[in-house]
Image: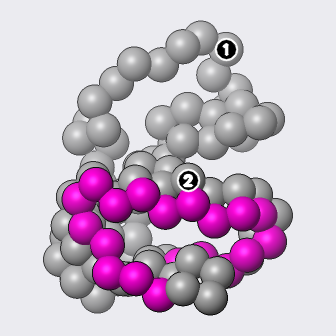
Amino acid sequence: MVEHAEPVVTAYREHVRFQEEGFATVLVAGTSRLRVLVVSLVPQQFLPVHAPAVDLVATVLEGEGVCAAGELEAEVGPGSVVVVPAGRARGFRARTPMVLLG
């Protein structure tokens, strides 16, 4: 992982990368304790449900879709915040072009 030793101030739109062949993730900043990603999905793309050993805090910046968070399944849209503890299942499916910050 690239370590960002300096503070980062950026606009999320600079990191949006829609692609038809699969969802896109762009690392905005990262350290051994934190990763900040912009995730871009076109309609019907999805982040498969998985349960990594890291906490998740994600905010939907654009678009609409569905998220799985633990045992919950919920509709999400701009402003939705998803928090999932480490080891719990999480995933997203886009209904419209969707951008997440997490």
Residue 21 at least partly seen: no
Q: Residues within 10 Å of mark 1 (few under 14, many from 20)?
A: few
Q: Residues within 10 Å of mark 2 (few under 14, many from 20)?
A: few
Residue 88 occupies quadrant: bottom right
Q: Nearer the viewer, residue 85 or 62?
A: 85
Whether residue 57 is situated above or below residue 51 in the rendered picture: above
- Classify residue 85 as left or right of residue 84: right
From the image, tell me which residue sits under label 1. Answer: 5
Amino acid type at circle 2 is Val
Element class at badge 2: strand
Q: CA distance from mark 2 to mark 1?
A: 22 Å
- Classify residue 83 as left or right of residue 25: right
Q: Nearer the viewer, residue 25 or 35?
A: 35
Residue 98: image location, x then y, percent: 26, 66
Stretch of the chain drawn in magenta = 73-91
> In this figure, which colouring scheme has been used for the structure?
one colour
Amino acid type at circle 1 is Ala
Q: Residue at x 25, y 67 (%)?
A: 77
From the image, tell me which residue sits under label 2. Answer: 57
Element class at badge 1: loop
Residue 43: image location, x then y, percent: 22, 82
Residue 102 at least partly seen: yes
In this view, the mark in front (2 or 1): 2
